[in-house]
Image: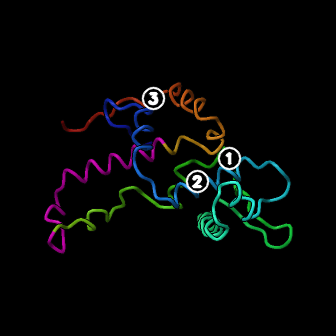
C-alpha cells in the first residue's frame, strides 16, 4: 500500500488532490460512474439518461462510457432495453480505478521525457531528486483514491468530509533519507 508523505495526513492529501486540476475526462467519467452506482433499478441506464443527469452532451457521455467499458468498469447492452451498468458493486470500484482508466497515473514513468528543457533529453535523466518527489506524490494520491469507493461517494459533501476525517491515517513514512 502506498505511503503518505511525513507530516501529511490523509485529509490533507485529499485537500491537495482537489486543488490539483484533474482532466475533464477524469472528472466527468467519475461522475458518470457515480450516476451508475446510484442507479438501483433493474434496467441499465442509457447514455441519454446519464448525459441528462450530469448535464453532458450524449456524444461526450458516450465517449466516456466507451473508455470505462474498455477499462472494464462498465458493461453495455445493445437494443431497446440496452444501456450501461457497473461491472462490480460500487464498494468494489475505487476512485483510483476510475482515474487510472480515464487518465492514468499523475506522473507516468516517462513524465520527465516531456520536460527536457532545450535539449532532446533531460540533463537530469539519470539522477533527479525532483522525480523522487513526483513519484511520492503519485503513490500518495493512488493510496488515498484507492481507499475511496464509489459507494463512499454516495455521501453528501459534508458527510464525506467528516467520514474522511474520521478514517485512520497510515503511519508516517520512514526509511527515507532526509
Q: Earlier in the sequence, mark 2 or mark 1?
A: 2
| Whether residue 59 is situated above or below residue 1 in the rendered picture | below
Most foreground residue, 149 or 62: 62
The circle drawn on residue 90 is 1
User: Which residue in the protein does label 3 denote?
Assistant: 169
Q: Residues within 10 Å of mark 1 (few under 14, many from 20)?
A: some
The N terminus sits in image quarter: top left
Q: Is residue 49 magenta?
A: no
| Residue 101: % across, % down | 53, 61
Q: Secondary structure at mark 1?
A: helix
- Residue at the (64%, 71%) spot, across then down: 59
Most foreground residue, 42 or 1: 42
| Whether residue 152 is situated above or below residue 125 in the rendered picture | above
Q: Secondary structure at mark 3?
A: loop
Q: Nearer the viewer, mark 2 or mark 3?
A: 2
User: Which residue in the protein does label 2 denote?
Assistant: 30
Q: CA distance from mark 2 to mark 3?
A: 24 Å
Left or right? Give the position of 89 relative to 123.
right
Q: Earlier in the sequence, mark 3 or mark 1?
A: 1
Q: Is residue 135 magenta?
A: yes
Q: Residues within 10 Å of mark 2 (few under 14, many from 20)?
A: many
Region in magenta? 118-144
Q: Secondary structure at mark 2?
A: helix
| Whether residue 62 is situated above or below residue 95 in the rendered picture | below
Q: CA distance from mark 2 to mark 1?
A: 12 Å
| Residue 84: % across, % down | 74, 62
Q: Earlier in the sequence, mark 2 or mark 3?
A: 2
Q: How is the image coloured?
A: rainbow
- Residue at the (84%, 58%) spot, across then down: 43
Q: Quadrant of residue 85?
A: bottom right
The C terminus sits in image quarter: top left
Amino acid at each position: 500500500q502506498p505511503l503518505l508523505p511525513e507530516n501529511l495526513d490523509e485529509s490533507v492529501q485529499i485537500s491537495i488532490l482537489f486543488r490539483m486540476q484533474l482532466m475533464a475526462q477524469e472528472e466527468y467519467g467519475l461522475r458518470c460512474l457515480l450516476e451508475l452506482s446510484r442507479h438501483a433499478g433493474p434496467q441499465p441506464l442509457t447514455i441519454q439518461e446519464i448525459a441528462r443527469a450530469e448535464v453532458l452532451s450524449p456524444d461526450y457521455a458516450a465517449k466516456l462510457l466507451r473508455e470505462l467499458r474498455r477499462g472494464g468498469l462498465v458493461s453495455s447492452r445493445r437494443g431497446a432495453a440496452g444501456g450501461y451498468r457497473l461491472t462490480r458493486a460500487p464498494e468494489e470500484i475505487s476512485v483510483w480505478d476510475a482515474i487510472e482508466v480515464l487518465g492514468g497515473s499523475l506522473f507516468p514513468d516517462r513524465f520527465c521525457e516531456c520536460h527536457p528543457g532545450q535539449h532532446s533529453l533531460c540533463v537530469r535523466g539519470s539522477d533527479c531528486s525532483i522525480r523522487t518527489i513526483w513519484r511520492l506524490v503519485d503513490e500518495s494520491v493512488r493510496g488515498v483514491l484507492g481507499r475511496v469507493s464509489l459507494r463512499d461517494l454516495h455521501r453528501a459533501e459534508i458527510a464525506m468530509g467528516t467520514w474522511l476525517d474520521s478514517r485512520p491515517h497510515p503511519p508516517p513514512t520512514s526509511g527515507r533519507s532526509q
